[in-house]
Structure formats: C-alpha cells, structure tokens
Image: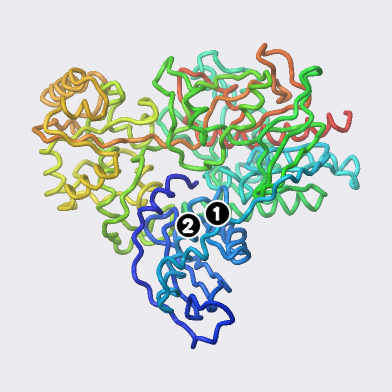
Amino acid sequence: MKRFFCLVLCVLMVFGAIGCTSTEPTEPEGETLMVPGTYTGYGQGFYLGEPIKVNVTVDENSILEIEVDKDNGETPTILQAAIDKMVPRIIEHQSVYVDTITGATASSAGIRLAVIDALNKALEAAGSDPSAISAFQTIPEKVSGVTETINTGVLVVGMGGAGTTAAMRAAEIMYAADPDNVKVLAIDKAGKYGGTSSITTEMFAINPPKFQEEHNDGKDYVDKTAMRKAWLEYTEGDQKTEMVDILLDNSGKALDWLYYEHGFRFSTPKRGFTEEDIYEVKYQYLPNDRGNNKDVIGQYYDGIYEDYTALGGEYMLETEAYELIYDAGTNTVKGVKARRYDGTEYEIYADAVILATGGFAGNGDMMTKYLSDEYYPLKGAWKVHGSLQNDGKMIESAIQNGAGTYNIGMCPIVHMAGTPAFLTQFEKREIPGQKGFFTGRPAVWSPGDIPLNMIVSGDSLAVGRDGKRFAAETNLMMLDPWKAGPYYYSIWSNDQVQRIKEEGFTAEWVGLPVGLEFLGHQCPIPLNTPLPEVEEVLQAGIEQGFIYKADTLAELAELIGVDPAVLEETVATYNGYCDAGKDPEFGKPAEYLEKIGSGPYYAVTGAPYCYSTCGGLDIDTNFNVLLADGKTPIKNLYAVGTDSIGVLFTEKKPYVTFGGAAQGWAYTSGYLCGEIAANRVLGK
C-alpha cells in the first residue's frame, strides 16, 4: 500500500559521508571527471527508516553500472519497477534526470538521489569542481511528431485489480472462441501492473462456493440476506440496489476464479473494522501474519499476467491514456489517445473500452471540482496514500463527452490520518527486538514523528477549518478524520507540550495505530518516553509550514485562518467537558479529556490520507457508462473498479467498514465486465 509525498522528503534529505572502493585510475580518453571505481551512495525513498543504497561503478567520465541494494524498507515490487526501468535509462542517457517511474515515484527519487550521492563522491575523488555533476543532469529529449495507430477488440485502460481481471477474463472468452484471434490489450501509465490492489490487504467476497467447500465443509460463512439488509440500510436508498446485488451475488465466484484458476491465495474470511461489522466477508491475501507481504502479492500478479499473455493477451506499461476518441453523432467511443513515457503518441481503436483507472484521488483539481460540501467539507486536494497516478483523466474525458456520474461527491476512501509533511532530520531510534509489521524491518521511531503522533493522539483537541470540533479525537487514528475534509488542526497548549517533553505520550492509542504504522517512520513513539526534543521538533514543523505557534488562541486562530471567537469558544467548551469528565458532543471517553492550558499555543496540521475516491461514473448492470440522463449507454464504453464504485454507496456517509469492499468491487466488476465486453465484441 504506497507512494506520494516523499518527493518533498527527498529534497530535505541531508546526505551523510559514505566511503568508496576504487581501482587505480587509468588514463582517460576525454576529460577526467571522476576516479574510476565503485562508489556507494544513499538516497531517501518512501521508507523513512532507511535510505536506499546504491553502488555506482564509473570510469573517468561515465556511469558504467548501477547496483541497487534491495535490503531496505521499500515495497519490493515498487522498488523493482524502478530498478528495471529507471536504472538502464540512467546508464543509457548518462543522466540522473531521466523520468521517475510512475507508480514508483518515491523509490525512483531515492535511487536518483543515491546515484547523485555516489557520483559526487567520484567527482570529489578526482578533485573535480562540484558543478561537474551537471554533466550527468541533462534532460533526455522526448520523441515528437510520432503517432502510431493500434487496433484491438477489447482495450482495458488501467492494470490494477479491476483492469487485470477485466483483461484476463476477456482474454479467456476470446481464446475460447478463437485461440488465434485474442484481441485484448491492457495499458497502464505506471511502470508496473497491479495498481493499488497489489499493495493492499484484502478482498470483500460473499460465500465463495469452491473455497468454502474446501475450507468450511461447504457451509456459508455469512448470511447474504442479512449482509444485504445491512448494506442497504447503511446507504439509505442512495445506492443502486441492482449493483449491490451484483457484488453480493458474484464476488464469491470472482474469488474462486482468482484462487483456483489463477493462483491467488486468500485467508478464510474475517470480520470488518467495527463492532457492528459482524459479517465474515474480508479475505486477506496470504501470507497474512505480516504486513510486508507485497512481494508475494506481486508474484500473484506475475502469475495472472503469465496466464494472460499465454492466451495471446497483450499489455503496455508506461503508456497513459488521456482522452477518449468519441463520435458524438453516434454516441460511440471508438478508442483512446495515449502517450508513452518517451513521448510516442498512440491512437488506439477498440470495439470495447473498459475504464479501470483507479479513480481521481491523484488530481487535486478534480477533488475540488467534484467532491461535495453538502454533508461534510470535502472539497479540496487530499493527501494520498497509494497511487498518485490515478488522476482521473479518463473519467474527466468521459464526463466532458456527456457521461453521467453517481455519488461522485462522496468522501474518498480514508483509513488513516497523518501530517502533510514529515521531518527526517532527527535521530532514528530502534526498538530492540521489535519489527515493523508493514516493513519487516527493525522497528524505528524518531522524535521527528512527534507531530504525527500529536494529530492522532486521543487526548488532543482537534478542530476543522471552521474552528469547531468534528469528531471524538480518539477516532482520528482511523475512522473519522475524513469528517474534517482535506485537513484539520490539532490544538495544543504549552502545558501539554511540556508534559510531552517530560513524560512523553501517556494516553494509550485507541484501536490499531494504523496511520502510525503506514506514515512517517512507521512506528508509534513508545508511550511514556520523555521527549526533550519536542520544542525543537515543533519549531522545525513551523519552519516547514505545517505547524503554527502563537501566544494567544486568538492569534493562533488568525494564523490558521479561523475566526478567533469560534476557536476560543471551542476551547472553552472543550475545557468545560474536561472539568465535567464528560463529552456530550462526541462521547470521547473521560480518560482522554485533557484541558487546553496556558500559552503559547500550537496548531499542528492533520491530514486524512485517502487510498482512492469512491464516487465515479454512472453505469448500468452491464457496466456500460451512461449518459447524464442516467439511462442511455455510451456505446462501447465501460467502467469498473473505483471508476464506478459510487453506485454502491451514498454521499451522506463514508466508504463501508465491512472490509475490502473496494477491492471486492474491483475484482468482481472487472471479472464480469471483461466477459460482457468480450462477448459483445464477439457478437454474442
């Protein structure tokens, strides 16, 4: 599950002095820039606990070889995509400024910085001026004026969970009809397949027949009728009931297909996130005894793409579709315009186009334009924990050509909160004998994560952009941070800061410390650990622009753009709750009610991190995208996964907590739509 804000971190990274091994220099044919040999460099990738290490072999004036050490906390499949694609291009172009690999942005940036670090050492060894690094900082030219035409039967745009299953199922149908004429093409702008589905945890499914025959003596795991009733009650009639039924009736079959025909492995089902979620519907990827299982999930995707290409299916990575080819006169989509990473343009014509692009969370303009403020203040650019390449270009192209939307204004899928930026300049501290669940590395924390811990601490006071409380602060770790919209503020008094300085964080974390295991150094600061650096850390956050400090609450309110009278009233009311030992507004337990004391005061910016958007294009039961009238299908155009998941929900509430619903919809909708589209192309 990873990659986004780390470009900022990379800029902030301070390199350490690393030794090198080198051979005796030889007489250069051209200008001597470097002492030949192998040099070690380090650069910050996604995981803050360890940098990425590279060994760069050079001669007098060129890069000969780059070896990336994989023994770090980066997600293996993402790091490998950067190694496979970016490293050869650096050597080919003799430039560190080749494009980063979409879908592996932070790992790519870490490799780039590590190579720069190593090259600087090689230059220094030769006594070259530091400016000589510019020889390796040219920007490779893109292809221009080249447009290629491709024709296919089924075109799948996006190769995450929904796109993968759609392409695979379409290839199976076409192969069964004519093994020599499988015309299925999948494309993705990322440098790897699998998308968000390959870095998440679980799939929602209802009673997979073969699976429960093997694992549960053929008995149902869940009462589907009760599950359906709970879903429809939750969505208050705003969902498309027929689409909910499609999910409930077919998700088990989709899981069986993945498990028994394509080598995916899932655990027996578990219940959801809250006490009300009693339904055993979330099937976790195996192995599920650790969170750093993405290498195995990557192998599942390797396997299904081997199956896909064996049938004659084709795919193109690093190829971004950006516009539909649409004939308004006949209301028909004929294909897409796309662009390869090197600048090559494509016009891809197809008899069926399936959009599986992962929503639009990576597009702040679309988030501002389409999210709704009707029930909660949702408009604005949100922080993303996942695939920033999911920027909604094809959703927007469909809308511009008359497509309708369904619940597009609902809140994104949010499971955690963090700070909008992170501090890397403070010492890392290992917890002896403990490993990070999601990294598999020695558990590391840093005083630099004090702000991150503050914004999810249950004994804090959090306010939205209006200066008012919006949830019980004990729910900010996971369930409720989205209610504030794209960001909120955690308010702390000097009294509380001094307590952190002397005693550390003293309140037990409520529930799973989700955000603290995914963000920052990915480990909560141990409770009751004095933090004498707290004021230095807060000052660093002020300098970085996400923490504010003022002598009075009124002055603090001005700094964060809140009405001073509102913030002062909020604090006074909250302090009254603390005195009374009861929170009648949100029901926060009394043991977490800690008064805001004397100044100076701090406001730490908190940001809900989303995986994806929820609302999207309107579709019918065949997954055809509908026009804005909600009735007329756009010919040849389909949408699956989070491009259409809004049909299951309501704008009044967030994404459901049953467990894995987005992934269940991705796999189920892709599986069904691939078959439907292929049969239509075949004239069936």
User: Is 628 situated above or below 314?
Assistant: above
Q: Nearer the viewer, residue 302 or 589?
A: 302
Q: Is residue 31 left or right of residue 513?
A: right
How far apart marks 2 and 1 lie (CA) works out to 7 Å
Q: Is residue 179 left or right of residue 375?
A: right
Q: Nearer the viewer, residue 477 or 327?
A: 327
| Residue 122 visible (yes or no) | yes
User: Is 363 situated above or below 340?
Assistant: above
Secondary structure of the residue carrying tag 2 is loop
Provide residue 441's location: percent of width, then percent of height.
41, 61
Name the residue that disc number 1 marks.
Answer: 78
Name the residue that disc number 2 marks.
Answer: 74
Report the residue at 46% width, 35% height from top: 610
Q: Nearer the viewer, residue 144 or 682?
A: 144
User: Is 49 situated above or below 182?
Assistant: below
Of the residues shown, which amino acid type is indicated by label 1? Ile
Q: Quadrant of the C terminus?
A: top right
